[in-house]
Image: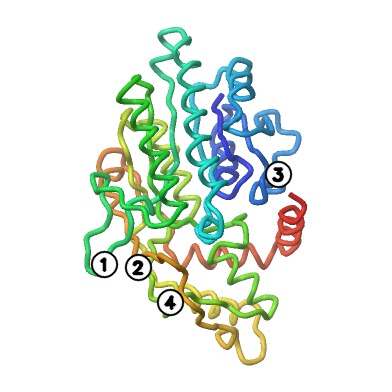
Amino acid sequence: MILVTGGAGFIGANFILDWLSLHDEPVLNLDKLTYAGNLDNLRVLDGDPRHVFAQGDIADAVRVAGLLTRYRPRAIINFAAESHVDRSIAGGEEFIQTNIVGVFRLLETARAYWSNLPPEERDGFRFLQVSTDEVYGSLSPSAAAFQESDRYEPNSPYSASKAAADHLVRASYRTYGLPVLTTNCANNYGPCQFPEKLIPHMIVAALNGQTLPVYGDGMQVRDWLYVKDHCKAVRRVLEAGRPGETYNIGSRDEKTNIEVVRSICRLLDELRPVDGGYEKLIKHVADRPGHDVRYAIDASKISDELGWKADQSFEAGLRETVNWYLAYPAWVERVRSHAQAV
């Protein structure tokens, strides 16, 4: 069995669905069920004995220790995080508590569990921290893409909290020998993403005839990674990554924010046309504080060492994503209702 934390969220749920489509090895899913965590994302697994759900907080050491003792997972994959930059700017306390304090306690609990495993189980155990490219800061338009050896220069409370967590993970390896792995990924998109992030927000807003707000001139560049490609990369790192190492995960599909929004509008013009088209809804608004200019990932290491590469082009992935949101409007309403209730 493996333990996946944050498994009811966007990436975690996609990972569990991907894992169980390929493996019979069960998944213990620990999720706090905050506004962005919703078991609706995993409804197709209802009744599947391979998916064991436990509600709880990674910062609750007693809860986590009890689960580790009971289920004895061979690996922990930590997706649990507060992840929305705008929310971190409005108030960073929850980001500190989950992304730093929570990760520290999860590491300490994992270390105690790992230390008491029989030697053959201890040798095979892994702790995989899922992180972000935002820890590296901002790139100029002409700068080389982020490499694993680049200095951390986070620019938002969110990215600073993730950077702190990454340092704690590294320290657990260097100080105690806990066999950790870290992945830093590009911007994810795809099915089941809570509609506060750029792509689902624009899809849902456009379908409701609402304004499509674009920060500043919209020329901020992001490397876009389809969530199923990310899941495949995490599986590969868990399988063959070297303990103590970091692996950057990206597709080198760089797009400006305004390009992304216009692409969404064009797809909706084709798939759900309205009079006058959707681009008329675009409105440029004041830029957010500390907005990073560009992110780009150099994925050479994971490609060269582990043979991973992204399969999905941005154009194909975006079409699949738009089609998913068109097909599941009830999901959007349910997750919004859930978020309001939490």
| Residue drawn 49% across the image and 62% down it | 317
| Residue drawn 60% across the image and 40% down it | 7
For residue 254, side relative to residue 283 (left or right) = left
The residue that mark 2 highlights is: 293
| Residue drawn 28% across the image and 54% down it | 146
Q: Between 168 and 255, which is closer to the camera in this rendering?
A: 168
Cα separation, mark 3 vs mark 4, equals 34 Å
The residue that mark 1 highlights is: 140
* Label pair 2/1, CB-CB below 8 angstroms: yes
The amino acid type, in three-letter code, at marker 1 is Ser
The amino acid type, in three-letter code, at marker 3 is Leu
**Mark 3 or 2, nearer chain start:** 3
| Residue drawn 50% across the image and 58% down it | 85
Query: Residue 4: horizontal and vertical position, in percent?
Result: 56, 34
Cα separation, mark 1 vs mark 4, equals 15 Å
Q: Which mark, residue 218? A: 4
Query: Residue 295: horizontal and vertical position, in percent?
Result: 34, 61
**Which scheme is used to colour this image of the protein?**
rainbow
Characterize the local packing of mark 4: few (<14), some (14-19) or many (20 or more) Cα atoms within 10 angstroms: some
Characterize the local packing of mark 3: few (<14), some (14-19) or many (20 or more) Cα atoms within 10 angstroms: some
Mark 3 lies on a secondary structure that is helix
The residue that mark 3 highlights is: 39
Cα separation, mark 2 vs mark 1, equals 7 Å
> Count of labels shown?
4
**Mark 2 or 1, nearer chain start:** 1
Determine whether 341 is above or below 105 in the image.
below
Determine whether 87 is above or below 74 in the image.
below
